[in-house]
Image (cartoon, grey):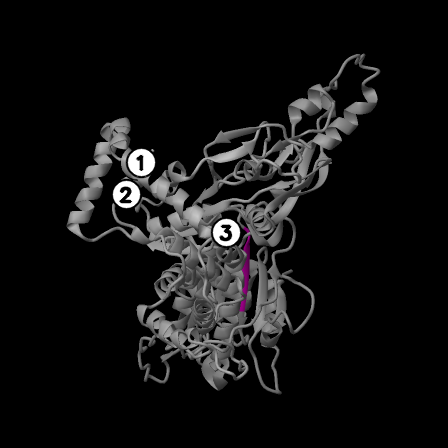
Amino acid sequence: MFPFSAVVGHDDLRLALLLNAVHPGIGGVLVRGEKGTAKSTIVRALAALLPELDVSAGCRFGCAPGTTDCPDAPHDGVQRRPARLVELPVGATEDRLVGSLDLEKALTEGVRAFQPGLLAAAHRGVLYVDEVNLLHDHLVDLLLDAAAMGRAHVEREGVSVSHPSQFLLVGTMNPEEGELRPQLLDRFGLTVAVKAARDVAVRTEVIRRRLAYEADPAGFAARWAAQDAELKQQITDARSRLAGVSLPDGELRRIAAVCAAFEVDGMRADLVVARAAVAHAAWRGAGAVEEADVETAVRLALPHRRRRDPFDEPGIEEQQLEDAMKQAAEHAEEPSDEGPDDDGPGGGELPEPQERPQGNGNAPQDRPAPEPSPAFKARLLEVPGVGEGAPGKRSRARARTGRIVRSSTVDGNGLHLVDTLATAAPHQAARGRTGPGLLLTASDLRRAVREGKESNLVLFVVDASGSMAAQKRMSAVSGAVISLLRDAYQRRDKVGVVTFRGRSAEVALPPTTSVDAAATRLKKMRTGGRTPLADGLLKAHRVLEIERLRDPRKRPLVVLLTDGRATSSGLGGDPTKDALKAAGLLEQTAVVVVDCEQGHVRLGLAAKVAEALQGTCVRLDQLSADHLAGVVRAA
């Protein structure tokens, strides 16, 4: 293993990991960075620095001596072992993570016994998830539950177990491969962005050390053993000082003021900053938290919590941090006699970064898209039926993971153990069973049919013609698409954008998992000109055909935003008839037509387009989840 002390650079990442080693209550570290920046190398090297643990002898969950709320309690005896770093693979199953029925004991002894999973192995250690942003959503949900409660609850296959599971969660990710779910993002105490150094001397030293390690791993580790041992002792000493570090009221008010100034959600940020500041003070050997400790903690704890929207860039600008610390300095003094105002401490606004100016778009038929209306929580648009696509959060699907809905003798994934045993049990006497265990035949085997949620390809087909740009209609359409994109981000969908205006249609964004790229393209969209509806539908059909070849299992959902007018056609015929003819190519595709027509007099043309597409038609103002209860199923 590459020594922690031998890592070149990445000072913020090293500090974040060391602070969590001192105070595991901080909540872990999320490491964001481009590929090839030694993210995984540094995290794995941390395990060698963690102090050894006293554990109850024979305890499968590594509980501390004296623990009573453990399935293996009462314990007998104490042993000492190193802290563990447990890796959770992206493709892990639910059984591997939370544990399952012990098949060997069930089949040979006929008893129910629990086989612990990775959550048990990681108790009082480090749970490391490489490429955490690619982790399946059902595993993310289990991680969230365990991280929030400090316990893992298993209710499955006739087994009911609850065991301690307190771990330091460390994740690494490459933002180019997609973002992390907001719920899991908030669970990480600190976050660090790493980049490869551009300094030639630093890059040279990185290469030199890596080649030396590959040539002689044992000898290289021996050369850095003293430095690693020193760091390990510093962690132990800092842990012993932790309880004696005081957090003065002035610094507590400073923390609250900074978090309020950055408008972070909830109180978790305040608590994480406080714990990190205390750990930093203990690390440098101080007896009390000072302003420098708070600033360091803020720099590590708040960047990912400022992301109030999936399209916001993570991070804190240096000027904003400086301004927030100056504002918070006023609150760090003794409080005045006046009561708190409605804004709370540090409620001053931060200066917003200046937006880049866009093109002037003076041409009357070639205007830039107007600023989108405020986004809202979008209704769920689903693909009908049951698919078999990649795990996600949109439509129903048969899956390898998820809840078991029934057993079957012909289809399904994995063994449905309970039904298999129940089928075999009545025949044991007839089969001559005399000892422990069950006698099984092939006819007893039952497969587990599971159902979960899948992600879909959501293709937005947007009418950008002059009729849509009139009366600020395009502003409302842009706001609706932004809302649907945010929904697609949360549901792990692949998204694409087709626009049509003037004489033709174009693929503004080929299908991608990067929804922020879709939002960027939407803001740059030009409007004006005639309405080639047929061309837009044909272009959408071609995009879907290509994607169907790439991934036949990913079911598409087309969201057509239009007022239904067709005033031009690249096919050379009547625009309306050509549009209806092109709609026939999408008959087998789930389509939702969003009627963008406004005003008291409505022609209802979008509804006719939806009928030709055999899809569902909803008005633009009905896309909000708060407007109507229930779920829209595209049919």
Q: What is the three-letter code of the residue carrying label 1?
A: Phe
Q: How many marks?
A: 3
Q: Position of residue 225 (x, y in %)?
A: 29, 33
Secondary structure state at the residue bearing disc 3:
helix
The tag on residue 86 is none
The tag on residue 7 is 2
The tag on residue 2 is 1
Of callouts 2 and 3, the N-terminal one = 2
Residues shaded magenta: 555-560
Q: What is the three-letter code of the residue carrying label 3?
A: Gly
Circles 1, 3 touching at the beta carbon (< 8 Å): no
- Of residue 493 and residue 606, the one placed in the foreground of this image is 493
Between the residue at mark 1 and the residue at mark 2, the CA separation in whole angstroms equals 8 Å
Q: What is the three-letter code of the residue carrying label 2?
A: Val
Secondary structure state at the residue bearing disc 2:
loop
Circles 1, 2 touching at the beta carbon (< 8 Å): yes
| Left or right of 28, for residue 119 | right
Image quarter hosting the N terminus: top left
Q: Find out whether residue 532 is within the magenta segment.
A: no
Residue 593, above or below 284? below
- Of residue 402 and residue 203, the one placed in the foreground of this image is 203
Label 2 or label 3, whichever lies nearer to me, is 3
Between the residue at mark 2 and the residue at mark 3, the CA separation in whole angstroms equals 25 Å
| Left or right of 114, for residue 570 | left
